[in-house]
Image: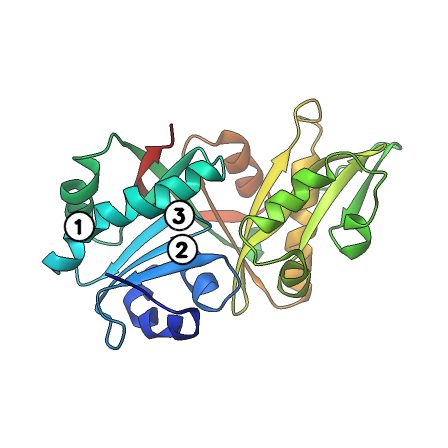
């Protein structure tokens, strides 16, 4: 198994084409998202392991490559898990796109390391069902674009959390500002909640959101998410959404503003001790 140089990432594009519900793959290949790719052959890869953001691990290509498969556990335990632990990440997620890769993961990884199955949902946006959130913000709150001026405002609380959310998937804050988009709600001097693009590929943007404790159930998440959708509509972007099946707040926001669930799928998750 070999670590593929970044300038050769596009060699594995055909292997990941079936991951239409995971644009993290193309986001990594295009250089937007932090990631490593391990392959069976540097010149003509037929099997690949993509590690995006140091915890999203996707398998593609030939699932019958015995030599490659036997080395998966060593990459996960020797490289991916230690790095995730060092970054204080809670878990790594293992994605597969067919039954054959599922069996490989079970045989080579989950039978050797304690793991659990997690159900997830994939959403695409239906502009005909778009229902922008109309609630008016209170006088002490405002909607702000996540831009350079926001990151330079030292008077704001929680700004470091927003920066961490940007820096985890994106190669840099500047890269996010060039190719991504996000909005936040500021209540008095605190960033109370935000929605931002975590992955970008072509005209597609995948979004995620967060509302800080103490500021929830005020509609801030829907307001920030609606602003992101408005941006996509005005700029010819296609918004996408992925979340855990048990993440009720994320599901409620997505479905309330016009996202339609198009796929349910499972992954394996390994907790980091």
Q: For the C terminus, which image quadrant?
A: top left
Q: Position of residue 146 (x, y in %)?
A: 73, 51
Q: For the N terminus, which image quadrant?
A: bottom left
Q: Quadrant of residue 114?
A: top left
Q: Position of residue 157 (x, y in %)?
A: 78, 34
Residue bearing the label numbered 2: 22
Q: Nearer the viewer, residue 244 or 164?
A: 164
Residue 196 falls left or right of residue 85: right
- Which of marks 3 and 1 precedes in the sequence? 3
Residue bearing the label numbered 1: 99
Q: Is residue 90 visible?
A: yes
Q: Residue at coordinates 33% horizontally, 36% vertically from top-left?
A: 269
Q: How many marks?
A: 3
Q: Residue at coordinates 27% horizontally, 32% vertically from top-left?
A: 115
Residue 162 falls left or right of residue 135: left
Q: Position of residue 112 (x, y in %)?
A: 18, 35
Residue 30 falls left or right of residue 158: left
Q: Residue furthest top?
A: 214
Q: Residue furthest bottom?
A: 43
């Amino acid at each position: 198994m070999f670590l593929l140089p970044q300038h050769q990432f596009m060699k594995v594009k055909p292997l990941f084409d079936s991951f239409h519900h995971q644009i993290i793959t193309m986001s990594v290949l295009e250089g937007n998202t932090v990631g490593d790719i391990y392959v069976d052959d540097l010149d003509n890869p037929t099997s690949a392991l993509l590690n995006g953001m140091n915890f999203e691990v996707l398998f593609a290509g030939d699932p019958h490559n015995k030599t490659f498969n036997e080395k998966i556990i060593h990459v996960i335990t020797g490289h991916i898990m230690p790095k995730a632990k060092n970054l204080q990440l809670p878990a790594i997620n293992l994605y597969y796109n067919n039954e054959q890769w599922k069996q490989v993961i079970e045989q080579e990884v989950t039978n050797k390391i304690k793991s659990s199955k997690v159900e997830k949902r994939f959403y695409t946006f239906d502009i005909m069902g778009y229902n922008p959130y109309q609630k008016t913000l209170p006088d002490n709150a405002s909607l702000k674009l996540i831009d350079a001026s926001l990151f330079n405002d030292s008077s704001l609380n929680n700004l470091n959390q927003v920066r961490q959310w940007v820096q985890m998937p994106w190669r840099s804050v500047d890269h996010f500002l060039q190719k991504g988009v996000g909005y936040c709600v500021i209540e008095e001097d605190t960033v109370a909640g935000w929605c931002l693009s975590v992955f970008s590929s072509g005209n597609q943007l995948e979004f995620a959101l967060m509302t800080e404790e103490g500021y929830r159930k005020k509609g801030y998440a829907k307001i920030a998410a609606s602003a992101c959708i408005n941006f996509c509509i005005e700029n010819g972007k296609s918004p996408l959404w992925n979340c855990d099946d048990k993440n009720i707040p994320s599901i409620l926001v997505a479905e309330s503003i016009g996202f339609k669930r198009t796929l349910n799928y499972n992954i394996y998750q390994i907790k980091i001790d």
